[in-house]
Structures are given as structure tokens and as C-alpha cells.
Image (cartoon, grey):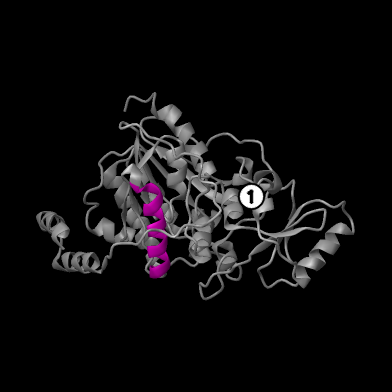
Amino acid sequence: MTKTVPMIRTLQHLGATREDITSFIKKAKSKKTSPKLDVCKNFDNTKLKPVLPANAPIAVVLFAGGGGIEAGMVEAGIRPVIAVEFDPSKPELSKAIAKTHHHNFSEYGCRIIQLTVQEVARLGFIGFPHRPDYLHASPVCANFSQAHTAKAGKGIETADDLTAAIAIAEAIRQLQPRVFTLENVPRYQNSKSFSIILQVLESEGYSVDYSVVNMADFGLPQARRRLVLVASKGFHVAIPAHRKPIGWYEAIAHLIPMMTNSQLLPKQQQALEKFLAGNAPTPLLIERVGGRTQSKYKPGHLPCNTILRSHFTDHKGCNRSKFADIWLADGTVKSLSIQGAAKLQGFPDWYEFSSEAATAGSIIGYSVPPSFATQLFMSAQSILKGAKI
């Protein structure tokens, strides 16, 4: 409690309400020292994490998740200093994800704040740097995802979505980042939430570039369509140019021998037989999950299908030990590992995941692919370094 006293005094000085201060004290009392993260075994973490200079550009991240965007930032030479991560609809999962984030980024001086972005905005972004080099937001996308809106045909926008957008707009207005970036599912661009963010960027004088991109066009071995926005003030930063796509097999072939042996389910076997009826044997990635009568599959020369959190958990949020299998031309069947899925999502080798499949899989499924983020921020850095603003 002693450590919270200076913060309470700051809140009082800034005119925070009694309710805000009471809420802060309750959250501070509920925080417990986190045990050491139980990381996944068999990860090749021999690749050293990047060492950043003291004068590295700094970033603030809203809706941080496990730090996919931060991993990309670090690879691009950017230091994340504050990350906000708390989802009240999944509090225990959010705490586990935040613990993994702390494990991977605390050495860079990154402070993880386990409050909602709305709560942080209501408190006036106390302790946040003014004019950071980068501000990123990946607001919760569940209500705009294709799976959620397949029947309705459009996003079911909620009050929480709108207050999240208002909080992001307030962060832009108060912090005045040199560069603002946003990532979300494609349908987010048709929402009122997105309009709120665009309006504040325009009113604050930012140059804005946004489009729906397939991250497979940027070298990710996965088909993943996402809305990406880049905004800057006084200079122009755009989404980077495409890179040569690669297939899923090329990305993880070196990991397959270490993966656990598996057996195909009947519906996977049907999918395999259908493929072999008209094609020569080649490595296949065959999904195990989903209610379809026949499993989805991808030949090795193509990017894999979009990786989702739901692949790793059942409807109750429990671990799924197997979510996809790899069939090789010699008849060998391997269970796709968390490490393999992380590689398909573009995570660097040094990132360490929780040993809980539900936590690790949620981080992978939710994250901005770090390899794409690295390209985005390296492109921005090349322009930012020459900007005299």
C-alpha cells in the first residue's frame, strides 16, 4: 500500500473524484506479486533479445495483449514504456496475458497497467509520457469479427466499443504522439468507433493512411486480413511495401521433427483423401477444430489459414491440447505445437509463452503479428529519423 500513496496524492492534485481514488486503492490492494512465469518447454530462446540504446524512441500501447506489437517494436529498435492491458470480460485470462507481457518486456522498462483503457483515460493518463514517438491501439475486436457478425451481416457495436474509441481519441489528444497506429479486423472501418478516432486525428492535424491488408503479402506465412492505420503529424508515414509471400511449411519445417506425433481424426482423414485424389502428396496443415463435416487444410507452399484464439480453447476457455495437425508425404502426422503456431504468427524466437495453451494461444490469436509490426515500424523509423518535429 505504501507505493500507492504518491499515486493517490497525484490523483488528488489532478482533481480525481473520490470514486476514482477508491477504485484505484481497491485495485492496488488486489494486486499480488506474480510468480515466475511457467514458460513453454522446448522453445529455442538462444536468439538474444535486442538491446536498445538509452535514447531509443519510445512507445505507448493501448489494449496490449501479450505484446505482439511490442515484440515488433523492439525488433525495430523502439522501446515500449507503458502498456495498458485489462479485459473485464475475461479478467483471469487478461491477468495471465499481462503476466506474460511483463515477463517479456519488463527488462525494457515497460510498465504494464492492468486497468481498462477507459479507466486510464478517466484518470487523465497520469504518468504517461507527453509526445511519445509512437502510440498504438488494437481495441477489442470481438463485436466486429466475421465469426461474430456472420448472421447479422454487420458489426454489433456496443457502448464499450464506443467508450474505448473515445478513450483512444482522448489519448491522441492528450499525449500528442508523433506517430499513431491502429490495427483491427476489417469490419472495424465501418464502425462509429473508427469514425470517432478518424475525427480526432483530423482535428489534431494528423496525416492519415489506412487500408485492409493481407499480412501474407508482407511475408507472414498466414492469410490474415486486418485493418491497419498509420497517422503522423508534420510528415507522412505510410503502410510499407509488400514482401514476397512464403508458405507455412517453409516457415516451420525446422520445428516439425520436434513436434509430438499425432493421429488424424476421421474428418481430417476425409480431407486428406479428397486432396490426394487430385494432387501429388505434399505437406498439409489440417485443422482439428470447428464444427465442419470436413476439416480445412492448406498445402505447404501456401500461407496457413487465419490463426484465431478459438483454435486453442474450447467454448469454456479451457486448453485444447491439439488444434491442428501436419501430414507429411511419408505418412507421418505431427501435432502443430505452440512454438509452430507462434512462428506462423510471426513471433521472434526470444519471446517466451506461458505453458498454458489457453493463455499462449490467446496471445497468438489476439496479437498483431510481430514480423508485420517490425516492417511497419522500421518503415516509420526511416521517416521519423529525418523529421525535424
Circle 1: element type: loop
Q: Amino acid at mark 1?
A: Gln
Q: Nearer the viewer, residue 141 or 2?
A: 2
Kindly identify the residue that appears in the image at 38 percent across and 47 percent down: 105
Q: Nearer the viewer, residue 321 or 77?
A: 321
Report the span colored magenta.
91-106
Residue 211: percent from the left, percent from the top?
A: 54, 44
Does residue 152 lie above or below 225 as drawn?
below
> Which quarter of the rendered picture does the C terminus lie within?
top left
Residue 339 relative to residue 138: left or right: right
Which residue carries the number 1 mark?
222
Residue 229 relative to residue 110: left or right: right
User: Residue 102 colored magenta?
Assistant: yes
Residue 234 relative to residue 140: left or right: left
User: Residue 255 colored magenta?
Assistant: no
Kindly identify the residue that appears in the image at 89 percent across and 59 percent down: 277
Q: Main secondary structure of the magenta part?
A: helix
Residues packed near mark 1 inside 10 Å, few (<14), some (14 to 19) or many (20 plus): many
